[in-house]
Structure formats: C-alpha cells, structure tokens
Image (spheres, rainbow, N blue to C red):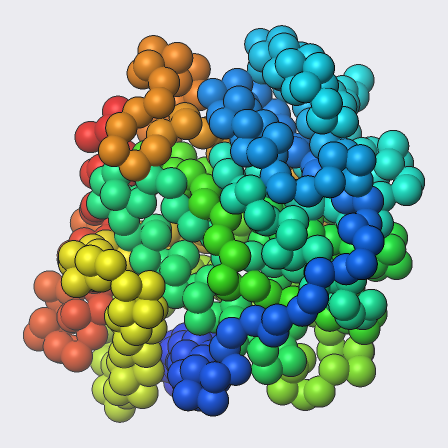
Amino acid sequence: MTPVAVLKVVYWGAVLFLTLFTAAQGYLFLRYLLLMVRGKHRSPVVPAPSEWPLVAVQLPIYNEKLVIGRLLDAVAALDYPRDRLIVQVLDDSNDDTVSVVAGLVERYAAAGLDVRHVRRRKRTGYKAGAMAHGMKLIPGAEYIAIFDADFVPPSDFLRRTIPHLCAASDVAFIQTRWGHLNAGENWLTSAQALSFDGYYVMEQTARARTGLLFTFNGTGGVWRAEAIRDAGGWSSDTLTEDFDLSLRAQIKGWRGQYLPEVVVPGEIPMRTETYKRQQMRWATGSTQTLFKLVGPVWRSRLSLFQKFMATISLMQYLPHPVMMLMMALAPLMLSMRGYRGLDFGPLAMLSLFTPLMALVTQMLLGGNWPRRMLYYPFVMVLGTGMMWNNTRAFWTAIQSWRERRELEFVRTPKYAHVAGGVAVAATAAVKYTVQASVHTYVELALSAYAIGIAVSASRYAPSVVPLFALYAAALAMIGGHALIER
C-alpha cells in the first residue's frame, strides 16, 4: 500500500469508530423513546418487605470538612428503623476533617443513631479499600448504601430502594438518578447538568430496561452484600471501582436495577481545573476497566449485542484519543489530498442524536427547560475540549496497566456550594482549590494548531473546516477559562 493509502485507512478507521460510537448512543435514545411509548420506562412498583433488613450506609470520605456536615445531616434524617440501620463514616482524612467528623459522630450517636467513625492507619486501596475494610466490620448487614461526600440523599431513599432488592434475589445493586445542587452556578455547571441529565434519564434507563449491562455510578445506590462478595469484592486496581464491580457482578449473572424516579442531588465541579481532574480520574479508570474486563465480557454468556454494547460502554473515553489522532494526522491528510472521497456525512447525521437527546430529556424534566437548553453549545465545548486531558488519561491507564501499578485516587474537591449562594466562606475553600497546570497552555497551543488546520483546509478540504473550528473553539475555551479562573 502507498503512504497515502495507509494514511486513508487509518483515518477512515478513526472516522468509522466515531460513527459506530455515535450510532450506539443514538440506539439508546431511540430505545428510550420506544420504552416511553410503551410505558415501560418507569420503575416497577414493589411492596415494602414485611420486615426491614439490616442496612449499612457507607460514607467514604477524604478531607471533606466543607461538606461532611451536610451529608451526615441528610443520612441522620433517613426514614428507616433505627434498630436496622448502621452508618459508617469511612474517614481516610489527614486534615482537620477528622475532628469535624468526630464531633458530628458524637452528636448523632447521642441522639440514638448507630454511627461509627472508621479510621485506617494507611489509605490502602483508596475508596475501594475503605469500603472493603468497612464491610469486614459489618458482617451482618445484608445491604450497603453508598454516598459520596458531596451528595445529599432524600429522607425516603432507603424506603424506596430496599424493597426492590428484597423483591428480587438476583438484583445485585440499585442505582438512582443523580440530581444537581448547583446546576445554575455558571456555564460549566449548567453544561455538566445537561450532559448528566441525558445520561441518567435516557442512557441508564435504556440500558437497564433492555437487558444491557449498565453501570453503578459510585454513589446514590445500594448494593447487596452477597453480590459484592460473589463478584470478587471491591478492587483498587482501577480508579473506577464502581464501574469495575458492577460489570463483574453482571458478567457473573447478577442484575442491576435502575430507579430514575429516585433522585439524589450532588455537587457539580464549578471550576474548570476541578472538572478536568474529575474527568482525568474517570477516563483513566474507565480505560483501566476496559483492559481488565473486555476479555471477560467477550468470554461470557452474554448475547453478541450485549457484548458489543458493553464494549462501547467500556470504550466511552476512547473517542478523545481518536480525535487527537485525527488532529495530529490532519497536516498529512491535507498535504497528500487525503480528504478526497472521505465522507463525514453519516457521522454528522448521527451526531444530531446528541442534541435531540438533551432536548427531549429537558422537556421531560420540565421547568424552564428552554433556558437550560441555551447552555447546550457548552456541552459540545466540554465534550470536545477534554480531548487533550482525556488522551493523557488514556496513556496513563495504558502505562499503569502494563506496569501493574496502582494509581493514586485523586479526589475531586467539594465546596458545599448550593444553588443561589455559597454555603462557606471563600477563604475556607482556598486549600481545596485546584490551580491551572501546564496542560492549560498545551490546550491553548492545540487550539492555535486547530485554527491553522481549519484555515489550510478551507482551500483544499472545506468539508472538514467545521470540525477543526469546533476543536479550536473548545480547546480555547477550556484552556482560556482555566486561566481566567486563576
């Protein structure tokens, strides 16, 4: 094959991957609409058990003094028999969070809540290690609810979720829908809320209701303790212990159940660098899980389509390295006239499913959805502007998996912000602030590079100009906003 032919094959492969990935997203959207037409998108109604089982609530935290009080207040208000409830604050903190938690635990214990402050000598295994350690201390608990520090469960959470686990012995976990405490804080939180809503309202529901593997999202859910043990327990060999365990359990034959009507609001990252840090961890962990479980998925007894859709889910952050590859090859494609005959039409048409999903989701959620949809262009900015950040995560995952090296679980700072105001003084949050890194300047440089490609393509391949204009704008906004925040 000639160099031009090889280049075209690689580029066509990248475009084909993005097309298939986008088609899978469109499939979930269409399946949700079909479920809605048939009235099957709602959760089944199950009766309360004759006797409420023993439930442990695990709160894995690390340096969360700004939000732990809000979380414990919500957990203490759970409407569940006190003699059937254990609360574990799995506190790996190394700052004054420890004393804050100690005071809160003492107060709620005096009020009759069985709440325990669990400390470890070493932060071995990070969040996964903390939860595994906590399980050893509560052998009698049948079910384990998990909440991250920045989430606020409603008081009826356990009464609405536990009956589903009691009614079906093959259900390993219950996942509920994430809500947002601070969606209207700025353009960044508004865009994230739109993106999360599409995922939690449509994608998760479509997967769960049609027999596809779906994900436990690490918080706002309940696990059957037996299923955790049967699937091999919490593991820290990936940074997404939730994704890993939920897939392992389903591969073994357990089911997950999704309850979109039960909403647990959480705090969305409000700063660009904080969001990038969160995305870095999620992208790295998801890629590690891809390497770990793609083999077991394809060796399992799942149907061919279930395996395909599970693989798409495992590759959810792979589009960013593919986009970086396409941008890196663009000068060669232009110089060799490689874009001749390359058809972006199917990809462009399928990409329309994403805004349609956002639109229908917001209409279903109600309220002032037209105003919320005004932020949709920023969803495109986030989806594209993370290409450098998540490509770095991809290579980090490759290196760690090849070397069998455990990566540090880097927490996402939380500030106890809520819609309409700030719950803590700004000075109290300074130590948790993530500063802009050198990669911000790399993003700005890549934006300038994409502008150059777009200008060059305007003469030789005008059909790709919109693509690289989007790359340039998204990278400039992500990098530029990080500098402005600084």
Q: Could you tell me residue 86's position as x and y percent? A: 77, 34
Q: Could you tell me residue 64's position as x and y percent? A: 54, 23
Q: Is residue 457 above or below residue 418?
A: below
Q: Residue at x 57, y 21 (%)?
A: 63
Q: On the image, which quarter does residue 100 sit in?
A: top right
- Asked if residue 391 shows in the view, the reply is yes
Q: Is residue 164 left or right of residue 193?
A: right
- Judge by depth and name the residue closer to the eye, 330 or 361: 361
Q: Residue furthest front?
A: 50
Q: Residue at x 69, y 66 (%)?
A: 47
Q: Residue at x 44, y 66 (%)?
A: 201
- Judge by depth and name the residue closer to the eye, 9 or 360: 360
- Asked if residue 238 shows in the view, the reply is no
Q: Residue at x 52, y 18 (%)?
A: 65
Q: Could you tell me residue 447's position as x and y percent? A: 22, 50
Quarter holding the C terminus is top left
Q: Residue furthest left?
A: 459
Q: Residue furthest right?
A: 139
* Number of numbered markers: 0
Q: Is residue 387 left or right of residue 348?
A: right
Q: Is residue 212 above or below residue 476?
A: below
Q: Could you tell me residue 332's position as x and y percent? A: 30, 69
Q: Is residue 23 above or below residue 475?
A: below
Q: On the image, which quarter does residue 56 sit in?
A: top right
